[in-house]
Image (tube, rainbow, N blue to C red):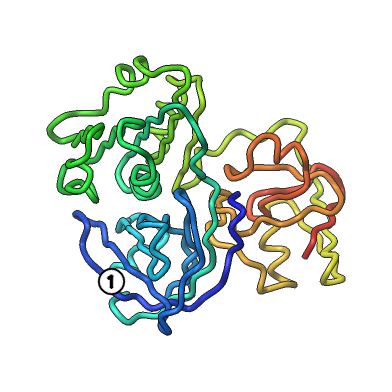
Amino acid sequence: MSATVPTTARLTVRSVVPEAEGVLGLVLADPSGAELAPWEPGAHLEVTLPSGAVRHYSLCGDPADRSTYRLGVLRETAGRGGSEELHTTVGAGTVLGVRGPFNRFPLVPAERYLFVAGGIGITPLLPMLRSLPPGSWSLLYGGRSLASMAYREELAALPGVTLVPQDTAGLPDLDGVLAGLTAGTAVYCCGPEGLLGAVRERWTGALHTERFGAPPAAAPEADAGTGDGFEVELRRSGLTVHVPPGRTLLDAVRAVVPGVPYACEEGFCGTCETKVIAGTPEHHDSVLDEDEKASGSTMMICVGRSRGARLVLDL
């Protein structure tokens, strides 16, 4: 995660504009005009909507602009309701709770870059493109149709950009594009799970991915976890709870510590990350990398469990 220290604020929606079919662009600002917390390309915000629902949205503006945060939000009618609420009830003047910025998708130094975006996955990549010198990167951007592809006009004017609307051009030629890359190229990909998987299958070099939903559930390991549940000591609260089979650790913790932060409940947003003081966590999230999981020092309590009879958490 980026070293930027997250903050909590109440920000006002300054404007709401359509960026494409089904995509709204929001501009947030401090109501007093104060500068906002700094951020770097790849960062996102945790946004609390008027209903109390918490969602995560990528920052897609200019990190040098400390007066506003810019977000691009796709309306997902089959989602969990956050984007639907934002599209139908949030407008100029609405006040939103914001926590962050957070960054688990930072831009790292490389000789060259290939960016691969699918649909609304373009949002975290935009600040990266703008921060790099021309000629050091290329972008392959696919979408359902040209009209559904946000920021297409800005991008079409830049060298190194290939727009691939599926209704007229089919699917992006991943084989051709990836085969032509040099060994020093870093590939950044954000979009649907199918796109992430297709790139992962074809590219063995440096790959950085960001997902906006949970990956397909993997079959549990045969020896994972404890069949009778496990005990969790919440060290700071001075409480101990039992987590039976079929109940999530987050649900058991919230029963006694209602204010514990959480959002996606699927292990991909990172909101519920919690320090492990003792015990061995069983990880089922897509936030931590393999080294972080192996260290056992932190876990996502919305999907994580215990490999032993007892965990001690910093809660």
Disc 1 crowd, CA 10 A, few/some/many (<14, 14-19, 20+): few
Q: Who's the residue at 30% across and 17% down the image? A: 176
Say which of 269 and 17 sits in front: 17
Percent position of residue 246, x then y: 68, 52
**Quadrant occupied by the C terminus:** bottom right
Residue closest to the far front:
133
Picture residue at 34% right of the left edge, 38% below the top: 117
Q: Determine whether 263 is above or below 309 in the image.
A: below
- Residue 238, by quadrant, is bottom right
Residue at position x 58%, y 58% in the image: 4
Looking at the image, residue 276 sits to the left or right of residue 176; the answer is right
- In what element is the residue under mark 1? helix
Task: Kindly identify which residue carries mark 1.
Answer: 88
| 25 up-or-down from 14: above or below | above
**Residue at the far bottom in the pictured view:** 32
Q: Which residue type carries mark 1? A: Thr
Identified at 59% across, 54% down, the residue is: 270
| Image coordinates for residue 266, horizontal then vertical, percent | 55, 51
Q: How far across and how far down the image is residue 260, in percent? A: 67, 68
Q: Position of residue 149 (x, y in %)?
A: 22, 46
Q: In this orientation, which residue lies closer to the viewer: 162 or 310?
A: 162
